[in-house]
Amino acid sequence: MRYTDIYLEADIEHTKQVVQGVFQQNKFKIQWTSPYSGTASRGSKGWNVVGGALAQYYEVGFQIYEAPESPITVRLTKMNIGGFGGLTGTVMVDKKFEDIVKAFADHFIQIGLYRGYHNGK
């Protein structure tokens, strides 16, 4: 799965609040699976099957943790590939993932917490 790690100079509880806020500002619904991880989704799986590329269902996994590279790391993972929309759906899901990563980075830069990032496979 494709992921991006965003490195921050921040407190883990404050980071959790910011992560929730950025997802909500971008109209994602959050499902927490632990105190510091979960899945954020936007759109409808059912409509994605019916409407293909036009339905635009996105799912992003997230983890907030302490790491050697930075006091806090936010890992965003692209959870779906847009397969029901063919090539167009895949491109749209990739673009939406890039957009949400940029939204997070821009927000963390704006509030002075951002320290860098790493794109993974």
Image (cartoon, rainbow, N blue to C red):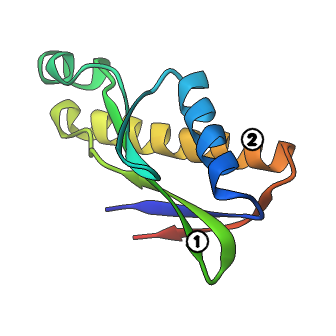
> Is residue 84 shown above or below 62?
above
Give the quarter of the image for residue 117.
bottom right
Residue type at tag 1: Glu
> Is residue 52 shown above or below 114?
above
> Is residue 23 shown above or below 97?
above
- Horizontally, residue 38 falls left or right of residue 101, namely left
**Where in the figure is residue 10, as x and y percent of width and height?**
75, 59
User: In terms of secondary structure, where does tag 1 sit?
Assistant: strand
Residue type at tag 2: His
Give the quarter of the image for residue 45.
top left
Whether residue 58 appears in this view of the structure is yes
**Where in the figure is residue 66, as x and y percent of width and height?**
58, 71
Quadrant containing the N terminus in the rendered view: bottom left
Q: Which mark is residue 107?
A: 2
**Where in the figure is residue 102, as x and y percent of width and height?**
64, 45
- Horizontally, residue 42 falls left or right of residue 66, namely left
Pick the residue in front: 89 or 36. 36
Residue that numbered label 1 is attached to: 66
Pick the residue in front: 57 or 20. 20
Specify the farthest residue to the bottom.
68
Q: Residue at x 12, y 16 (%)?
A: 50
Q: Residue at x 47, y 53 (%)?
A: 36
User: Which mark is in front, 1 or 2?
Assistant: 1
Whether residue 61 appears in this view of the structure is no
